[in-house]
Amino acid sequence: MTYLNEMDVMEVDLNNKALTWAAVRSVQRILKRQGYRRGKKAGSSSYHLSKSNVLARDSYVKVMHPVVCASPNASVVYLDESFIHQHYKRHNDSLFDPSDDLDVQRKENHKGRRYCFIADILDSPDMECQVVALDRVHIPAT
């Protein structure tokens, strides 16, 4: 709607909230009649494991299974590096033409702040869980 307003295809007073929303609804109706849809394009997957990740996961389980089963009170410590998505947007939720086979949906590359943490999973009913150390370090995403 803003684009149509800037290109002088339609005239909308953007300072008037009621008129702006009426124009948005009109443009949405026109686009729907033209066959456009809003949402995730069918047949595209946002997340999947690559073959190398599947092989790495399987080899990790083969190595860790004897370690975990060796002792009834085995303690396993995990290290992880997670991303906090500060400016989260819904994936692949955009306007698209369902008949366009050349339309490829793209994801943004930036991930936000990165936090590293270690978790220790204990099998002990009398031990309370506690945070031993918490260090927030901002590592720029590459």
Image (cartoon, rainbow, N blue to C red):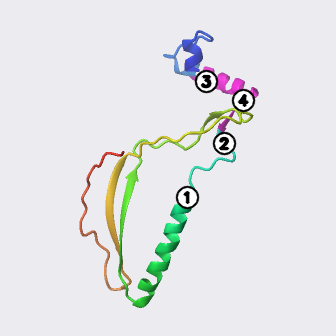
The three-letter amino acid code for the residue at tag 2 is: Lys
Q: Position of residue 129 (x, y in %)?
A: 32, 75
The three-letter amino acid code for the residue at tag 4 is: Lys
Q: Between disc 2 and disc 4, whose residue precedes?
A: 4
14 vs 44: above or below? above
Q: Quadrant of residue 49?
A: bottom right
Is 110 on the left or on the right of 45, as rendered?
left
Q: Are marks 3 and 4 in contact (CB under 8 Å)?
A: no
Residue stretch rendered in magenta on the structure: 21-38
**Which residue is painted at 59% across and 21% down in the image?**
1
12 vs 25: above or below? above
Q: Are marks 2 and 4 in contact (CB under 8 Å)?
A: no
Q: Which residue is mark 3?
A: 24
Q: Nearer the viewer, mark 2 or mark 1?
A: 1
Whole-angstrom CA distance, mark 2 to mark 4, is 15 Å
Magenta: main secondary structure equals: helix
Q: Which residue is mark 2?
A: 41
Is 120 on the left or on the right of 50, as rendered?
left
Q: Are marks 3 and 1 in contact (CB under 8 Å)?
A: no
Q: Are marks 1 and 4 in contact (CB under 8 Å)?
A: no
The three-letter amino acid code for the residue at tag 1 is: Ser
Q: Judging from the image, what secondary structure is the residue with disc 2 in?
A: loop
Q: Within 10 Å of the Cα at label 2, are there few (<14), some (14-19), or many (20+) other Cα atoms? A: some
Whole-angstrom CA distance, mark 3 to mark 1, is 40 Å
Q: Which residue is mark 1?
A: 50
Whole-angstrom CA distance, mark 3 to mark 4, is 12 Å
**Which residue is painted at 33% across and 86% down in the image?**
126
Q: Which residue is mark 4?
A: 32
Whole-angstrom CA distance, mark 2 to mark 1, is 21 Å
